[in-house]
Image (cartoon, helix red, strand yellow):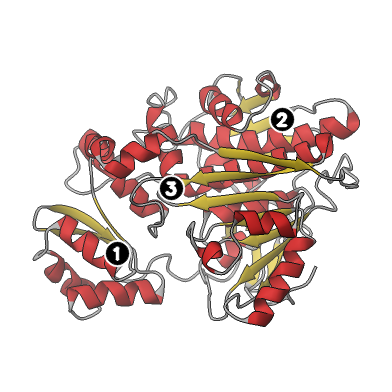
Amino acid sequence: MTTDRTAGDGYLRAIWNALGGQSSLPDGVVFRGAGSLPSVFPVTDLAAAAIGAAGLAVAEVLALRHGQLPEVQVDKRLASFWFGSSLRPVGWKLPPAWDPIAGDYEAADGWIRLHTNAPHHRAAALRVLGCAGDRASVAEAVRRWQALDLENAVVEQKGCAAQMRSLADWAAHPQGAAVAAEPLVWRTTAPATDKPAWPVSRDRPLQGVRVLDMTRIIAGPVATRFLAGYGAEVLRLDPPGWDEPVAAPELTLGKRCARLDLRGTEGRRTFRQLLRDADVLVHGYRSDALSSLGFDAEQRRRINPGLVDVSLDAYGWTGPWKTRRGFDSLVQMSCGIADAGMRALGQPRPAPLPVQALDHATGYIMAAAAARGLAERLRSGAGGEARTSLARTAALLVQGKAPADTAALAAETRDDCTMPSEMTAWGRARRVKAPVEIAGAAMAWNLPAGPLGASPATW
């Protein structure tokens, strides 16, 4: 195993600076391992850096209580695996990751991606196309459209689609320009309140911290899974009827999952009570969603003055697309990543990243923002807000140099996974070993992965 203190260091420092962290602390992060994911962009370096930032933020919490910053080590190879999936089912299989008609299609003048995993998004695309719900019929219908016209039509129907643009096209686009002008992390600090009484034990540093999780596939759940791995009590809330059959076994690890309908009076009353007693709120709905339900940022702060409020948006917080629905694969198409891969590799179709790296990286940045917010609570009693976006994480990725280590990652072996196996609600499974080590504080989860809605909406 090689040790490399510079791999991913530029990304780590960019993330840490965006979080307002002390500039010398990244010196305490050590990167190990060799090889990289196959991509024209330094995806493995970003993976190691984002996970390293989250680990460093938890280490900072420990240092505030115990007086010394523990060393943080990141395994680049394991980090790369976690950016794909950590779950290895034993004797059972996950359902297909994609709806049968989701994917890239050739329009009359270029490529477009349809995201149809959610039933209402699938219905929106088919309403616009006016065709049967099979891939051949969709492909035939898409060819009759200009890509931009189809994108606009699907979005107007509250669906999800993205025309493939080049890096230059995105830079010239009003939304691309808006995102480029945004910080990687928007941060604000609230007035100080009483300092919390969390134990901050050396082995479970986030024990006693309550995290209210209102996120969906994939970035937000990655953030809260990480926080749970260091002892936080995570309560995830989903609306009635929502399910994530592919993602739940991967991302509900360490969490209790409940259902709550915020459209009803009783649901809003319960949410208010949960929010009042939370230490951290992590939410990933569109930026106007909670506001429309009466819980904008100002109201959340009134309910809980010391709250650490961390949120996610797909396409950024300013510009004409600031409330547009989006997912990692769509943002890759919009911002030029899929086009750049296609051109660099000489392929005839879009070439996205080998993993949904925008989701995962943003998730760990959110976890780092939450932990840094907890550190500020310990230091001064002040709560705060942090906002991130997939599109801004994409801008960070494409600014990096091509990966210096182009060797392939060593193939996964049985020794890369935990033993004994975890008994999830779907069956036995193993997990890839933790990609980060904080000296004296092992990443471990108190609860196995379970289905959405299995727990009551209470702390």
| Residue occupying the point 54% across, 38% down | 185
Q: Residues within 10 Å of mark 3 (few under 14, many from 20)?
A: many
Q: To which residue does mark 3 refer? A: 355
| Residue occupying the point 47% across, 59% down | 286
Residues at discs 3 and 1 in contact (Cβ within 8 Å): no
Q: Amino acid at mark 1?
A: Val
Q: Is residue 430 above or below residue 340?
A: below
Q: Position of residue 384 (x, y in %)?
A: 68, 43
Q: Secondary structure at mark 3?
A: loop
Q: To which residue does mark 2 refer? A: 72
- Among numbered discs 3 and 1, the one appearing first in the sequence: 1
Q: To which residue does mark 1 refer? A: 155
Residues at discs 2 and 1 in contact (Cβ within 8 Å): no
178 to the left or right of 137: right
Spatial CA span between label 2 and label 3: 24 Å
Q: Quadrant of residue 41?
A: top left
Spatial CA span between label 2 and label 1: 43 Å
Q: How many labels, in total?
A: 3
Residue 42 seen in the figure:
yes
Q: Secondary structure at mark 1?
A: helix
Q: Is residue 238 above or below residue 413?
A: below
Nearer to us of marks 2 and 1 is 1
Q: Residues within 10 Å of mark 2 (few under 14, many from 20)?
A: many
Q: Quadrant of residue 32?
A: top right
